[in-house]
Every structure is written in structure tokens, then in C-alpha cells.
Amino acid sequence: MEDFPDMHQGNDPEDIGSFQGERRKIIQPTFLKDPKLEKLKAVLVDWINSTLKEEHIVVQSLEEDIFDGLVLHHLLRRLAGVHLSVEEIAVTSAAQTRKLELILEALNEKLGLQDSSLTRWSVKLIHNKDLLATLHLLVAMVRCFQPNLELPPNVRVEVVLLEVNRSGIKSEKEIEILTVESNSTTDSLSSSDSEDPIEQLLKLEPHKINTVKQAIMHFVNKKMSTLGLQVTDMEKQFSDGVILLLLIGQLEGFFVSLYDFNITPVNTTEMLQNVTLALDLLNDIGLPTTNIDPQDIVSQDVTTTLKVLYALFKKHKSR
């Protein structure tokens, strides 16, 4: 057990008690001044202000100006055309929480994240001015609503994963990915000589996207038929990592021991462990995944899931 560090990110130490029994992540204070992180925050602030310029809304601080739902409500209306029957200015904490519940429910639906357990933000975290959760939410919104906006690449921060219980505070450190690399000098899963083929694909008409997805699905099901498995929902069925691990084993001709992964994952942590193992295996077979965030696959992000499957498809389609 480690001592709980002094952290100032809209999370006062006395507020930690309200998260008893939960696990949460907080950015290490030394990383708050990281130039890449500061650049990402500045780009997001500029994006919000330019988007809401006609509404005369000006954001100066992501920590202080997002938590009450006003800015998110206007972004949702401007970017997604969603009009919610909520009060414009929520003054009390209870009113702000109710407003955020409606806004995040609508936002998550537009982002394709109806299962809130897969998101890296929540009403409680956003309202508590949690910087990490706020950044994840805004980056996801940019990816969805304005994918051509160039965000600073490869923004990573060290976080402390906290678990508060009656016996005290247990903590461990890990690296959290906010944005992935935009380019790579290697033949990785998210780069090409010009633009990533999956990024190009997603700019095509829906029927063309479906044609490619069906081709990949046919490839996957052909390889998985010997195991008696069939994929009908690409994003959902690959999100827990189980079928991905089995697919890699089938394609590469090796057996992934059932003791090495969670065959029936029951929570996001176990799903992340499976997907991380799968990405490690892909690295081992010569398909670099340094700019693939396992959380994106768990969150059923179609672009990331397609990138991984396309790389396998491209390598094995003629075999």
C-alpha cells in the first residue's frame, strides 16, 4: 500500500471519501505540466470556443467550465442536433447532476457507447471536475463529430489508480493513453504510406463500408468455424478480447492457454486484460500495436476494431 499523493485536479483529498469502494484514476501532479498535455487541453479549449462562438460561450478551463453540463449541452445540440429539455443554467449540485445524466446518456448514445460501463467518464467524475475523465470525453467527441481536427498525437500521462476502502487507500501507477500516434515509421496497425486505409474506408459511403466489413467478417468466421464460433456483431463480440485471442491462435497456429486469459470476463478490467494480451501477441508476430489503445476495443470503437482485424485480414487473406 502506498501513501495517497497530494493531487489538485478538481479532486480535493476530502472528496476521495465519497468514492469509497470504487476504483478511480488521477493524473500524477508532475504530469499536469507536461507540454503535450497542455497542448491537448489548449486545442480542446479552442475547439469548444470555435464551435460555440455563435452562442457567445467562452471556455477558459476544462476543469472549471465543463462540470455543470452547460457547455456539454450546447456542444451536443450544435454537433449532434440533439435538443434536450433541461434547464439552461443548473445552479444546485443536484440540478447539475440531473442535467449531466440526461446529457451524458444522449452523448454516449451518439458515441455508440450505450453501455456506460465501457466509458472512461461518468456523471460523478465529470461533475467532480475530474480532468482525466473530462479529457477522455472531449477527445471521444472530437473523434466522433469532427474527426478531421488534428489533436496532439501520443499524449500519455502517468496516473495513480486508487481504491478506497475502510482499511485505507490502495494505489498503483500506470500509463494512460489520451491520444495515439498520428504516424509511425513502421508498418503498424494505424499507419500507411499516406493515410490509414481504415480511416479512408470510414469516409466512404455506408454501403461500401459494409461491404468491407462483411468481407472481414466472412474471413473471421471461416477461420473460427472449426471452433464452432460465429461473429455477427464485430464491435461487440471482439470487445472482451476472447474471440480476438482465439482468432490470433487460429491464424498463427498456436494455442492460447485458457489459464492465460479470462475466457468469460465479467468486468471491464478482465476485458482489458484480454485485449492487452491480444495486442501483445500481435506485436510478437510482427504487427506493431503501440498506437492502438486496448480501451478503444473494449469500448467497441469501430475504427480501432477494424484496424486490428484488417491487419490480420491483410496478412492471412491469401493463405
Image: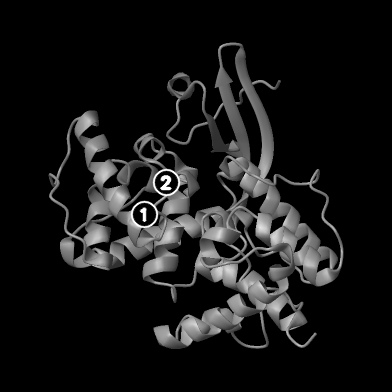
Give the secondary structure at mark 2.
helix
Q: Nearer the viewer, residue 64 or 171?
A: 171
Residue identifier under label 1: 108
**Which label's residue is closer to the chain start, 1 or 2?**
1
Can you give x and y, in whole percent of width and height, for residue 88 in the image? 13, 47
Can you give x and y, in whole percent of width and height, for residue 163 in the image? 58, 26
Residue at position x 42%, y 53% in the image: 137
Q: In the figure, residue 57 lies in which quadrant?
A: bottom left
Q: In the figure, residue 297 lies in which quadrant?
A: bottom right
Q: Nearer the viewer, residue 41 or 129?
A: 129
Q: Quadrant of the C terminus?
A: bottom right
Give the secondary structure at mark 1.
helix
Residue type at the position of mark 1: Asn
Q: Is residue 121 left or right of residue 224?
A: left
CB contact under 8 Å: marks 1 and 2: yes
Separation of marks 1 and 2 at Cα, in angstroms? 7 Å
Q: Which mark is residue 273?
A: none
Can you give x and y, in whole percent of width and height, for residue 214 in the image? 54, 80
306 shown above or below 92: below
Q: Is residue 107 left or right of residue 245?
A: left
Residue farthest to the right, as pictured:
254
Q: Is residue 123 left or right of residue 260?
A: left
Q: Nearer the viewer, residue 66 or 43?
A: 66
Q: In the figure, residue 107 lies in which quadrant?
A: bottom left
Q: Is residue 68 left or right of residue 2?
A: left
Residue at position x 46%, y 45% in the image: 133
189 shown above or below 300: below
Residue type at the position of mark 2: Ser
Residue 158 appears in view: no
Residue 154 appears in view: yes
Residue identifier under label 2: 116
Can you give x and y, in whole percent of width and height, for residue 129 in the image? 39, 38
